Amino acid sequence: MDRGSPFGAGPGGPGRWPGEPRSVQDRPEGRDEGDSSSLVRPYAVTGGRTKPRYDLAIEALVTAAPYPPRDVAMLTPEYRAIMDLCRSARSVAEVSALLRMPLGVARVLVADMAMEGLLRLHQSTPTTAGGQPDLRLLERVLSGLRKL
C-alpha cells in the first residue's frame, strides 16, 4: 500500500489510512483512544434533540433538588455534573459555560432533569400576556444598570 496516496491526508491524518490507530503523540492532548469522553457528539447525550421540551430561558436559575427522586449515583455523568454544579443556584447559561457544553445541550438536559424532579427551576415571567416585556422588570433592569 502506498502511504503517499490521497487517503493519507484524510481523516486519519498525514501518512495514515482512515481508521488506522494514531500514536500517542498524534492524538489530541496526548489522550489515549480509550478516553472517549471528548469524542461523544454533543447531541448524543440528548438523544438527538436540539430543543428542550418546554421553553427554558438561558437566564433561568437552577438548583439541585434537596431530595432527588432517585439515587444520584445511578445518573449519567452529565446529570451528575449538573447536579453537583447546581448545589448553589446557577443560570442555565452558567451550567453550559462551566461544564463546557453547548447551550442547546445544557437547555435540553436541564429541562429534562427538572421534569424528572432532579432540579428546581426558578424562572421569572418577564413578559405580559401580550408578549411584551413587563414594565416593572425593565425598570428594575434600568435601575440596576444605572447603579453600575
Image: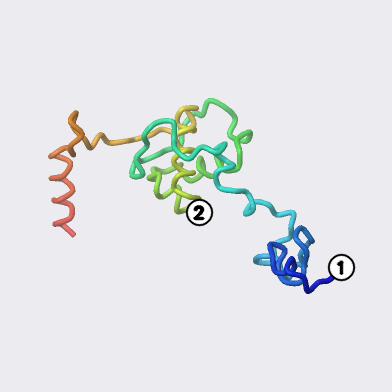
Between residue 117 and residue 10, name the one nearer to us: 10
Q: Amino acid at mark 1?
A: Met
In the picture, residue 138 is in which quadrant? top left
Q: Badge 1 local density, few (<14 within 10 Å), some, or many (20+)?
A: few
Q: Give coordinates of residue 82: x percent, y percent.
A: 50, 43
Q: Residue at x 16, y 37 (%)?
A: 134
Number of the front mark, 1 or 2: 1
Q: Badge 2 local density, few (<14 within 10 Å), some, or many (20+)?
A: few
Q: Residue at x 58, y 41 (%)?
A: 45
Q: In the rendered view of the protein, which quadrant contains the N terminus?
A: bottom right
- Of callouts 1 and 2, the N-terminal one: 1
Q: Amino acid at mark 2?
A: Arg
Q: Give coordinates of residue 86: x percent, y percent.
A: 45, 42
Proximity of marks 1 and 2: CB atoms separated by less than 8 Å:
no
Q: Give coordinates of residue 46: x percent, y percent.
A: 54, 38
Q: Real-space Cα distance between discs 1 and 2?
A: 41 Å
Q: Is residue 75 left or right of residue 84?
A: right
Q: Residue at x 18, y 52 (%)?
A: 144
Identify the residue at the far right of this view: 1
Q: How many marks?
A: 2
Relative height, residue 8 to residue 56 (above, below): below
Identify the residue at the far top of this view: 69
Between residue 68 and residue 38, name the one nearer to us: 38
Q: Give coordinates of residue 34: x percent, y percent.
A: 74, 54
Q: Which disc, if any, is residue 100?
A: 2
Q: In the rendered view of the protein, which quadrant contains the C terminus?
A: bottom left
Kindly state the secondary structure of the residue where label 1 is placed: loop
Q: What residue is shown with label 1? A: 1
Relative height, residue 84 to residue 70 (above, below): below
Q: Is residue 29 left or right of residue 146?
A: right
